[in-house]
Amino acid sequence: MAPPAAESVGIASEKKNVVPYSVMKLSDSQMDVPEKFVKAMGERPTVAYNDYCKEIPVISLKNITSSDADRARIVAEIGLACAEWGIFQVVDHGVPEELMTKMAANSMEFFKLPLEEKLKYATKPGGFPVGYASGSHRSDDDILDWRELMVHRTLPSSIREQDINIWPESPDTYRQVLADYSDNVDTLVTSLLGLISESLGLPTDYIKNAVGGEKTEQKILANYYPQCPQPDLTLGLRSHTDYGTITILQQEVGGLQAYKEDRDLWVTVEPIRGALVVNLGDQIQILSNAKYCSVEHQAVVNSNETRLTLVVFANPNSLSQMGPAPELLSEENPAKYRSYTFKDYLPICYAKQTKKHYDALAI
């Protein structure tokens, strides 16, 4: 059916921003899902948001510095999770639960603001996709996702200093909490990259250095998924792989699903209080020469509960030289991907010719 009239859903001019629909207002209206959000039959969800898979690994990082034996055990657990799943959850990870709660509360408070207030932070067409958007932060998407989102560039510090003045000021703790959250998750990412490096038989700092060291980039995305009257017709976020290194996700309501390729099955990640989800991105698959997998994933919505997620993308510096780690290659295990500069990988992703962007680099 045709979408509701502009004034009923808060449509804004696409010449000024990319917020053609207010998904929150669509949810509140309880109208049928507009055609602009209806996915093709083969892309619609097949597994419920709360039909949880109990097999996805949950790994405690509590003893990573206590003894060589404990660290070796955790490294082995992470290596197995990276090879078999490409996704796992971590607990005892060092990010304070109080900070996680504050970050979620501030993000939820932002999304509850009047549309006209949120539009002050709207993504501008043609620039880097930062700021507020609804449905998508890209103005060229034909079919939209059932979500509102807010994107921030948070690291390196030079980018944060450049962007912090365009971060929301309401609630008044928003900027400080976001900066603290960014720093705490960055510490966790460094630790995880060290464990993943060791699981590949590489030096602890190998992956961190490969993706740019202290110049690695971080982006934080808050996703708001309102209740949906017809969740079987749409998605909160279409299926994809992440083009960066690793992604850290915080959730309290189910909806994140990963594709288990060897079973041809979508599995739903169970929310665990205090846990953080770790997704491997394309750069880990490529660097490991496909020993580890960049997991395809999506977000489904539901008619019962609103869902909020906080997503931290750890990405290489744009000038990083990427490719399979030479130390992992041999006559028996030749390179499966060509080498490249990370900034040259991004156009492949934005072209949206395939969900698995790394296939374009296959040898």
Image (spheres, helix red, strand yellow):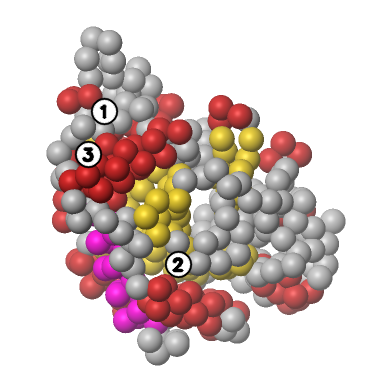
Residue 18, picture quadrant = bottom right
Dot 3 falls on a residue whose secondary structure is helix
Q: Which residue is mark 2?
A: 274
**Label 1 to label 3: alpha-carbon separation:** 16 Å
Q: Nearer the viewer, mark 1 or mark 3?
A: 3
x, y percent for residue 154: 30, 66
Q: Residue at point 40% right, 73% down?
A: 97
Residue 289 is situated, as x and y percent measured from the top left of the image, at: 32, 26
Is residue 183 found inside the magenta-colored segment of the image?
Answer: yes
Label 1: which secondary element: loop
Q: Nearer the viewer, mark 2 or mark 1?
A: 2
Disc 3 residue type?
Glu
Report the residue marked by disc 3: 198
Q: Earlier in the sequence, mark 2 or mark 1?
A: 2
Counting residues from the start of the chain, the first of labels 2 and 3 encountered is 3
- Front residue of 105/353: it is 105
Whether pointer 2 and pointer 3 mark residues with C-beta atoms closer than 8 Å, the reply is no
- Residue 324's mark? 1
